[in-house]
Amino acid sequence: MADRSSATAPVRPARINHIVLNVRDIEESHRFWTEIVGLKQVATLRPRPGVTLPKMRFYSADHDGKDTHHDIALVESPNLPAPDEWKLSGASVAVNHIAMQLPDREAWLKQLEFLQSRGVKFNWRVNHGVTHSVYVNDPNGYGVEFLYELPREMWENDIQGAIDYLENLPTEGPEALVDRTDSPSFGQKEPAAAPAE
Protein backbone atom coordinates (compact mmCIF):
# COMPACT_ATOMS: atom_id res chain seq x y z
CA MET A 1 0.00 0.00 0.00
CA ALA A 2 1.37 3.44 -0.93
CA ASP A 3 2.39 5.80 1.87
CA ARG A 4 -0.08 8.70 1.71
CA SER A 5 1.63 10.79 4.39
CA SER A 6 3.51 12.81 1.74
CA ALA A 7 0.28 14.21 0.24
CA THR A 8 0.13 17.71 1.74
CA ALA A 9 -2.05 19.49 -0.82
CA PRO A 10 -4.78 18.63 -3.30
CA VAL A 11 -3.87 17.94 -6.91
CA ARG A 12 -5.00 20.86 -9.05
CA PRO A 13 -7.50 19.59 -11.66
CA ALA A 14 -6.64 20.07 -15.34
CA ARG A 15 -10.13 21.45 -16.12
CA ILE A 16 -13.81 21.07 -15.32
CA ASN A 17 -14.96 17.95 -17.18
CA HIS A 18 -18.76 18.35 -17.20
CA ILE A 19 -21.77 19.69 -15.34
CA VAL A 20 -25.08 17.92 -14.67
CA LEU A 21 -28.24 20.03 -14.38
CA ASN A 22 -31.55 19.10 -12.80
CA VAL A 23 -34.38 20.21 -15.13
CA ARG A 24 -38.18 20.16 -14.75
CA ASP A 25 -39.00 19.07 -18.30
CA ILE A 26 -36.28 17.23 -20.20
CA GLU A 27 -37.95 17.83 -23.61
CA GLU A 28 -38.14 21.60 -23.06
CA SER A 29 -34.56 21.70 -21.81
CA HIS A 30 -33.39 19.47 -24.67
CA ARG A 31 -34.78 21.97 -27.18
CA PHE A 32 -33.03 24.87 -25.43
CA TRP A 33 -29.63 23.19 -25.16
CA THR A 34 -29.71 21.88 -28.76
CA GLU A 35 -31.72 24.48 -30.70
CA ILE A 36 -30.61 27.64 -28.84
CA VAL A 37 -27.21 26.80 -27.32
CA GLY A 38 -26.21 24.47 -30.18
CA LEU A 39 -24.95 21.46 -28.21
CA LYS A 40 -25.26 17.98 -29.74
CA GLN A 41 -26.99 15.15 -27.88
CA VAL A 42 -24.56 12.23 -27.77
CA ALA A 43 -26.30 9.76 -25.43
CA THR A 44 -29.38 8.92 -23.35
CA LEU A 45 -29.45 6.98 -20.09
CA ARG A 46 -31.17 3.72 -21.05
CA PRO A 47 -33.48 1.75 -18.75
CA ARG A 48 -32.02 -1.31 -17.04
CA PRO A 49 -34.03 -4.31 -15.83
CA GLY A 50 -34.82 -4.00 -12.13
CA VAL A 51 -33.23 -0.54 -11.77
CA THR A 52 -35.20 2.71 -11.57
CA LEU A 53 -33.30 5.46 -13.33
CA PRO A 54 -34.25 9.06 -14.06
CA LYS A 55 -34.60 10.44 -17.57
CA MET A 56 -31.12 11.67 -18.41
CA ARG A 57 -29.45 12.95 -21.60
CA PHE A 58 -25.84 13.86 -22.42
CA TYR A 59 -24.60 16.69 -24.65
CA SER A 60 -21.30 17.64 -26.26
CA ALA A 61 -19.87 20.91 -27.48
CA ASP A 62 -17.67 20.98 -30.58
CA HIS A 63 -14.18 19.80 -29.62
CA ASP A 64 -12.30 20.58 -32.82
CA GLY A 65 -14.84 18.66 -34.87
CA LYS A 66 -15.15 15.79 -32.38
CA ASP A 67 -17.68 14.93 -29.68
CA THR A 68 -16.90 14.09 -26.08
CA HIS A 69 -18.90 11.79 -23.78
CA HIS A 70 -20.53 14.93 -22.37
CA ASP A 71 -19.95 18.51 -21.37
CA ILE A 72 -23.45 18.92 -19.96
CA ALA A 73 -26.00 16.32 -18.86
CA LEU A 74 -29.65 16.89 -18.00
CA VAL A 75 -31.57 14.94 -15.35
CA GLU A 76 -35.35 15.30 -15.30
CA SER A 77 -36.55 16.40 -11.85
CA PRO A 78 -40.21 17.41 -12.29
CA ASN A 79 -40.53 18.80 -8.75
CA LEU A 80 -38.10 21.67 -9.28
CA PRO A 81 -39.55 25.09 -8.45
CA ALA A 82 -40.75 27.38 -11.21
CA PRO A 83 -37.86 29.28 -12.79
CA ASP A 84 -36.80 32.74 -11.77
CA GLU A 85 -35.34 35.23 -14.17
CA TRP A 86 -31.56 34.99 -13.99
CA LYS A 87 -29.68 37.63 -12.05
CA LEU A 88 -26.09 37.81 -10.93
CA SER A 89 -26.99 37.56 -7.24
CA GLY A 90 -30.10 36.71 -5.24
CA ALA A 91 -31.38 34.03 -7.64
CA SER A 92 -33.31 30.99 -6.44
CA VAL A 93 -31.29 28.37 -8.35
CA ALA A 94 -28.05 26.95 -7.00
CA VAL A 95 -26.08 27.18 -10.24
CA ASN A 96 -25.59 30.83 -11.14
CA HIS A 97 -24.62 30.35 -14.78
CA ILE A 98 -22.88 28.09 -17.26
CA ALA A 99 -20.44 29.81 -19.62
CA MET A 100 -20.37 28.64 -23.23
CA GLN A 101 -17.25 29.80 -25.09
CA LEU A 102 -17.63 30.51 -28.79
CA PRO A 103 -14.59 29.87 -31.02
CA ASP A 104 -13.99 33.53 -31.85
CA ARG A 105 -15.51 37.01 -32.04
CA GLU A 106 -17.22 36.40 -35.39
CA ALA A 107 -18.93 33.21 -34.16
CA TRP A 108 -19.99 35.04 -30.98
CA LEU A 109 -21.52 37.94 -32.94
CA LYS A 110 -23.36 35.42 -35.15
CA GLN A 111 -24.70 33.67 -32.01
CA LEU A 112 -25.93 36.99 -30.56
CA GLU A 113 -27.75 37.73 -33.80
CA PHE A 114 -29.25 34.21 -33.79
CA LEU A 115 -30.39 34.53 -30.15
CA GLN A 116 -32.01 37.89 -30.83
CA SER A 117 -33.75 36.51 -33.95
CA ARG A 118 -35.23 33.70 -31.83
CA GLY A 119 -36.58 36.20 -29.27
CA VAL A 120 -34.17 35.14 -26.51
CA LYS A 121 -34.02 37.91 -23.90
CA PHE A 122 -30.56 39.27 -23.10
CA ASN A 123 -30.41 39.64 -19.32
CA TRP A 124 -26.98 41.26 -19.33
CA ARG A 125 -24.58 42.32 -22.09
CA VAL A 126 -21.15 43.13 -20.71
CA ASN A 127 -17.53 43.48 -21.65
CA HIS A 128 -15.39 41.94 -18.94
CA GLY A 129 -11.64 42.38 -18.94
CA VAL A 130 -11.23 38.74 -20.01
CA THR A 131 -14.33 38.14 -22.16
CA HIS A 132 -17.14 39.84 -24.03
CA SER A 133 -20.36 38.22 -22.84
CA VAL A 134 -24.13 38.01 -23.02
CA TYR A 135 -26.23 36.26 -20.35
CA VAL A 136 -29.59 34.58 -21.04
CA ASN A 137 -31.91 32.17 -19.17
CA ASP A 138 -32.47 28.50 -19.77
CA PRO A 139 -36.02 27.19 -19.14
CA ASN A 140 -35.14 26.30 -15.52
CA GLY A 141 -33.78 29.69 -14.50
CA TYR A 142 -30.11 28.81 -14.91
CA GLY A 143 -28.04 31.55 -16.45
CA VAL A 144 -26.22 30.75 -19.68
CA GLU A 145 -23.34 33.00 -20.67
CA PHE A 146 -22.17 33.11 -24.29
CA LEU A 147 -18.68 34.55 -24.52
CA TYR A 148 -15.57 34.92 -26.54
CA GLU A 149 -12.33 35.16 -24.68
CA LEU A 150 -10.04 38.10 -25.26
CA PRO A 151 -6.44 37.31 -26.20
CA ARG A 152 -4.56 35.99 -23.19
CA GLU A 153 -1.84 38.63 -23.46
CA MET A 154 -4.49 41.28 -22.72
CA TRP A 155 -5.20 39.96 -19.21
CA GLU A 156 -2.74 37.28 -18.08
CA ASN A 157 -0.36 39.66 -16.29
CA ASP A 158 -3.14 41.17 -14.13
CA ILE A 159 -6.05 38.74 -13.82
CA GLN A 160 -7.45 40.68 -10.83
CA GLY A 161 -7.47 43.95 -12.78
CA ALA A 162 -9.14 42.26 -15.74
CA ILE A 163 -11.79 40.64 -13.52
CA ASP A 164 -12.47 44.02 -11.88
CA TYR A 165 -13.14 45.65 -15.27
CA LEU A 166 -16.81 45.86 -16.25
CA GLU A 167 -18.56 47.68 -19.09
CA ASN A 168 -22.36 47.31 -19.19
CA LEU A 169 -23.89 47.43 -22.67
CA PRO A 170 -27.41 47.59 -24.17
CA THR A 171 -29.49 44.40 -24.03
CA GLU A 172 -32.06 45.19 -26.71
CA GLY A 173 -32.20 46.23 -30.35
CA PRO A 174 -29.34 46.62 -32.81
CA GLU A 175 -27.19 48.25 -30.10
CA ALA A 176 -27.04 44.89 -28.27
CA LEU A 177 -25.24 43.39 -31.29
CA VAL A 178 -22.45 45.97 -31.41
CA ASP A 179 -19.03 44.82 -30.22
CA ARG A 180 -16.16 47.25 -29.90
CA THR A 181 -12.61 46.00 -30.27
CA ASP A 182 -10.86 48.68 -28.19
CA SER A 183 -10.85 46.67 -24.96
CA PRO A 184 -8.20 47.71 -22.44
CA SER A 185 -5.21 45.51 -21.62
CA PHE A 186 -4.23 44.73 -18.06
CA GLY A 187 -0.79 44.39 -16.48
CA GLN A 188 1.15 44.89 -19.67
CA LYS A 189 4.80 44.19 -19.15
CA GLU A 190 7.08 47.14 -19.67
CA PRO A 191 9.16 46.82 -22.82
CA ALA A 192 12.67 45.71 -22.08
CA ALA A 193 15.15 48.57 -21.84
CA ALA A 194 17.58 48.90 -24.69
CA PRO A 195 21.04 47.66 -23.79
CA ALA A 196 23.51 50.39 -22.80
CA GLU A 197 26.00 51.25 -25.48
Image (cartoon, rainbow, N blue to C red):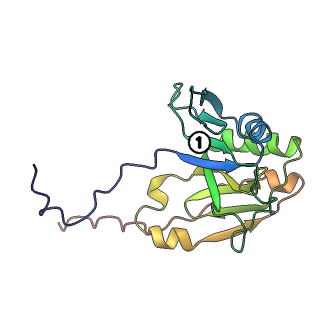
Q: What is the number of callouts on the image?
A: 1
* Residue type at numbered disc 1: Ile
Q: Against 16, is 88 above or below? A: below
On the image, numbered disc 1 is attached to which residue? 72
Give left or right: position of 67 versus 6: right
Give left or right: position of 4 versus 157: left
Q: Residue at x 42, y 49 (%)?
A: 15
Q: Position of residue 78 (x, y in %)?
A: 76, 49
Is label 1 in a helix, a strand or a loop? strand
Quadrant of the drawing holding the C terminus: bottom left
Q: Position of residue 62 (x, y in %)?
A: 57, 32
Give left or right: position of 95 versus 189: right
Q: Position of residue 60 (x, y in %)?
A: 58, 33
Q: Against 183, is 28 above or below? A: above
Q: Residue at x 35, y 52 (%)?
A: 13
Q: Position of residue 9 (x, y in %)?
A: 24, 65
Q: Residue at x 72, y 34 (%)?
A: 34
Q: Against 26, is 86 above or below? A: below
Residue 180 visible: no
Q: Against 184, is 56 above or below? A: above
